[in-house]
Amino acid sequence: MPWLTLIGLIPLVGAAVIWLLQTARPADAYVDDLDEDDPAPDPGLVAAAEAAVAARARIVALVTSLITLGVAVVMAAQFDRGKAGEYQFQEKLHWIPQFGVSYALGVDGIALTMVLLSVILVPICVLAGWNEVPGRRAAHFFALTLVLETFMIGVFAARDVFLFYVFFEAMLIPVYFLIGLFGGPNRRYAAVKFLLYSLLGGLVMLVAVIALYFQGKGGPDGFLITSLTGLHFSSTLTQRLLFLGFFFAFAVKAPMWPVHTWLPDAAAEAPAGVAVLLVGVLDKVGTFGMITLCLPLFPDASRWAIPVVLVLAVISVLYGALLAIGQTDLKRLIAYTSISHFGFIVLGIFAMTSYGQSGSVLYMVNHGFSTAALFLVAGMLIARRGSAQIADYGGLQRVTPVLAGAFLVAGMSSLALPGLSSFISEFLVLVGTFTRYPVYAVVATVGIILAAVYILLTYQRMFTGPARDFSAGWRDLNAREVWVMAPLVAVIIALGFYPAPVLDVLNPAVSRTMDQVHVTDPGPTVAVQPAAEGTNP
Amino acid sequence: MSAFQAAGGFIAPTVDYAAVSPMLIVFGAALVAVLVEAFVPRAYRFTTQVGVALVGVVAALCAVAALAYRNEPLQTAGVRAAGRAFAGAVVVDGVTLFLQGSVLGLSVLAVLTMAERAVESGGAFTAQAAAVPGSPAEERSIRAGLVTSEVFPLLLFSVGGMLLFPAANDLLTMFVALEVLSLPLYLMCGLARRRRLLSQEAALKYFLLGAFSSAFFLFGAAMLYGFAGSVQLTDIAAAIAGSGDRAAVINQDGLLLLGAGLVLIGLLFKVSAAPFHSWTPDVYQGAPTPVTGFMAACTKVAAFGALLRVAYVALPSARWDWQPVLWGIAILTMAVGSVIAIVQTDVKRMLAYSSIAHAGFLLTGIIAMDKQGIGAVLFYLLAYGFATIGAFAVVTLVRDAGPEGVVGGEATHLSQWAGLGRRHPWIAGIFTLFLLAFAGIPLTSGFMGKYAVFSAAVHGGAWILALVGVLASAIAAFFYVRVIVLMYFSEPAEASSAAVVALPGTATTFAVVVAALVTVLLGVVPSPVLDLAGQASAFLP
């Protein structure tokens, strides 16, 4: 059974249904610019028809995303955890044999986890965006979200470099429209900046993708990841240039300092649900690409690049955290915390230890959930107050205790409080880094302290103190919002206490990657002589 | 026995009529159209002309398909044994057939957009071409409801030239084809119904500069004749390689370099490569939009076909001389096209600069100098042609809001496109698709085309050119995206200047829908066409 194609196809069908439903409008509410001579239709009827379109679109979107989630869970149940290091549920068709491109799908432990992260977050975001867009435009909003889901599943499941690239680039278009059509006041600037940054990264990667094909053995299967691993490159320089081409695209995507500047704008202007998918899933494609493409395809060049990448990662950790402290806009603050967290993830990947890499991949999942919770709470606050400025809030703890609690759980997870999910991943990353690069690990630890500052300070400003006038008459979370937050909080706590099921799935895939890069964990005794293994080819 | 007979006498060339049948059909239809213009009563003339043009083009397309199906590549229309000036003047090989098929397929859509009269009665063309703009004579002709129908015979002659251009196997035939395709185009540029002065200026500019470039081409052909003693492309190649009849004169490198340079200038002018591009924006802006679409799509296909043939058949051995020059021209073209397009405020000028940038991308495929490069250029031309003709067809529909619900002229100023996505989601959506294809976003034909040419360039060792190409693509993406931002994310500054979309007739609707379908299909399932282009990508000497 082609599970992955099925999971990818369901949202696309849902999007088509929504789109068809919105074109079939009731005749008495028909509005067309060309028929301006006609008597204007009754505005009440139009509004009712538009509301009906929006309602249908929401229901279809929610049902579709839940079906997708269900099918994905059924698939995951059949995943052979003993062989999590191998690609499972494989599908392969020749797509463009002239270019060596196959439609090849398959998931290993890492990819399966990311697919699950995506399909869990989409229904939550649909629910969170329930009343985000009024009227007929709601149909566009939900259709685009579902199209985005298809591309996200595709990019994680692709087992062919060209196919990966196609999804990687195609993903930009729905996000671009979601930000540009439904974002905040500065949405045009943010959407264009996002698209241009991503396109530039992607196009540089395209040259590397082309050149990589000619380094391989070619043929109609030439773009399969399996055909391209373990290549003998024509020169060391070639391998390094190709690595840089891929890494640049992923660093823009992740995003790392200094190519991060699009993220705060995009995340701040996007509607909360879109920001969740953007930061929670899309950006993970960057780090996902580093661990599943950069390392296995260019093992020597990856080891060559370690020093620079680690420095950039540590700068990202500290820079993101410091700028987060200075933000006055809640969503920008969360975006900068994410830059800091992505620094940790990259640090763990390029520390080249199995602790570090397992921690990083687990971090990708945990960060997805905790940032999603933060963005969604922010969205709920903004929906009530109509402002994203932290200074406009205060004393909410007394008025909306559940909302405050949800923010606190998400925030505590973000600053890696033990018992909440991010703690374990951050701990693994730091331990993994310390065994080989103790200095970087120590410096990065400062990021945790800064995280405590930005989360607790924000909580203090927004939620503590006496209740203020503006919040009079505010209601706490309604049923829909509880349904949005409850799964996230549950997952955050569950993974905080018992991450073993996820780690069991990730570890075999991580150790396969370690083999492909020809690195082994430093034993406890060699921890004091770092980098000895890392620099040998 | 006269000296003439002693030299072998005159042997009438046996012509393979089947191989040249597409051209014969189109030229035949053009002649019929001239007669129609003269003898058919005015009431039926327009309809008859559209019918003749469509039948001619479609029949020629069928002939091309039959030839391709016959799968006998070598069809020389002129026979080697006959006098050298005549022999092998036309070669119908895979490349020729693919390009002729592309030109004819695009021409069908071009005829349909030109035949559109639902948007404004009388269509896009002036009522009476001879009337001075703004004169009483013009007033009278408009009031009389005159309709220009001579545009169709002109189109057919031009298409005929375009079929011959990439098939020409000697420089003189190529020159004749160049003139046959260009002269009707110069006229068609001046036929716009609205903004007559701009249109006439465009025609004059195109004619003058085109005449210069033709002169360059002819002068270059003469130089190459001096070098090789023949205008046949294969003889020139042999002379360069030092193995032909005139091997003795191969030390005359000056003649070769000058000749090749001048011939290439003539061709690069036609494909609008920088620095020979300056006519493009003015002509694209001034010409009636359906003509612009035809010109942008079909001329580019034909001219790149000729450029391919000259580069691959005549000058392959001299490539160390011309490849570096083309490198420079390709980089300059990509840079000029994509950078200057950013500051354009007129949608037709923007598309003109975009077409210049695309010429640069296509040149990278030619520089690759291998079989893969030929296939890539063929595929790119087809993909680009359909997106272009579709985009210009959409431009014909976006109009000024005239008084009392009558549509005005085309709303080409970009600010008028603001908010179009809200008001006319279909038209804006389809135009967005074409823009994304131009920008090379995956799952559109543009991406596959770009991938093909850059892949050929990297394979040919020109990865730096591919890198410049992707950087130019990123710059180009900026102005395509800007239009999308305008259409979807902005509201018009003043409601009165906002464009409205005229309800298209069947002809334009068909053309736009076909162009959009091809754009999507070539992006999602490019394999069959790539196969076709790959099989076609072998030149016959």
Image: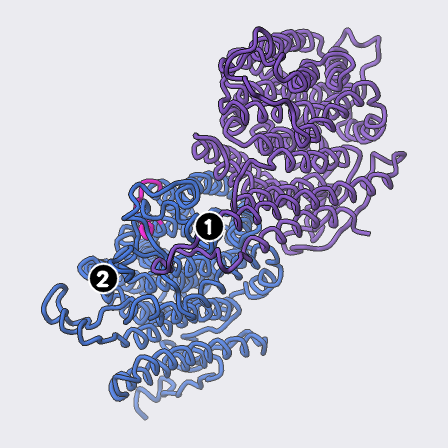
Chain colours: A purple, B blue
Q: Position of residue B17 (x, y in %)?
A: 46, 84
The label on residue B194 is: 2
Q: Position of residue B12 (x, y in %)?
A: 39, 88
- The part of the chain drawn in magenta is B342-350
Which secondary structure, mark 2? loop
* Location of residue A405 (image quadrant): top right
Distance, label 1 to label 2, CA atoms, is: 26 Å
Q: Residue at x 50, y 29 (%)?
A: A269
In the picture, the disc for residue B432 is: 1
Determine if residue B266 is in view: yes
Left or right of residue A179, residue A531 in this image: right
The answer to whether residue B212 is visible is: no
The answer to which of A36 and A523 lies nearer the viewer is: A36
Secondary structure, mark 1, is helix
Residue furthest left in the image: B136
- Give the crowd class for mark 1: few <14, some 14-19, many >=20 residues within 10 Å: many
- Residue under the point 45% across and 81% down: B21
Chain name for mark 1: B
Q: Nearer the viewer, residue A531 or B432?
A: B432
Q: Identify whether A127 is placed above or below B96.
A: above
- Tag 1: amino acid: Thr
Is residue B347 shown in magenta?
yes
Residue B461, magenta (yes or no): no
Give the camera-side residue of B26 and B308: B26
The amino acid on which the numbered mark 2 sits, given as a three-letter code, is Arg
Question: Residue A399 location, x and y as percent?
Answer: 61, 15
